[in-house]
Image (cartoon, grey):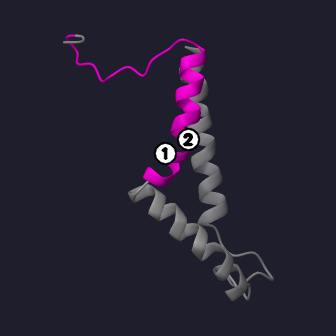
Amino acid sequence: MFGATSLVLSSIYMLWLYQRVMTGPVANGNERIRDLIPREIVVVAPLIALLVMLGFYPKPVLDIINPAVGHTMATIGQHDPGPRTAEGPR
């Protein structure tokens, strides 16, 4: 019960906060400030491109981390389980 109540109250607070910060009027003196200057765009653009690329093709990163994950799983004596259906393994 406490968890559900705190979830509802925190959701209400976050929506209220978002409304005040993102959709409210612009404060005095901030009308002329641009969102991003060209130097910031040059820094952010490669990061966004990398993020999109890894979203569509994560294999290069997974190839790097899989040996370490395999070693860790072997060390703790676990294996990577295959997907299971609602009926259980076949």
**Residue 59 location in percent, x, y?**
43, 51
**Residue 34 location in percent, x, y?**
69, 85
Q: Residues within 10 Å of mark 1 (few under 14, many from 20)?
A: few
- Residue nearest the viewer, comparing 15 with 37: 37
Q: Secondary structure at mark 2?
A: helix
In this rendering, the answer to whether 76 lies above or below 59 is above
Instruction: Name the residue that disc number 1 marks.
Output: 62
Instruction: Name the residue that disc number 2 marks.
Output: 65
Q: Toward which corner of the image does residue 28 lie, by quadrant? A: bottom right
The extreme right residue here reads: 29
Could one spot residue 16 in this view of the protein? yes
| Residue type (three-letter) at the residue carrying disc 2 | Ile
Relative side of 28 to 8, left or right: right
Q: Secondary structure at mark 1?
A: helix
In this rendering, the answer to whether 78 lies above or below 20 is above
Read off the magenta span: 59-87
The residue lying at 50 percent from left, 14 percent from top is: 78
In this rendering, the answer to whether 45 lies above or below 85 is below
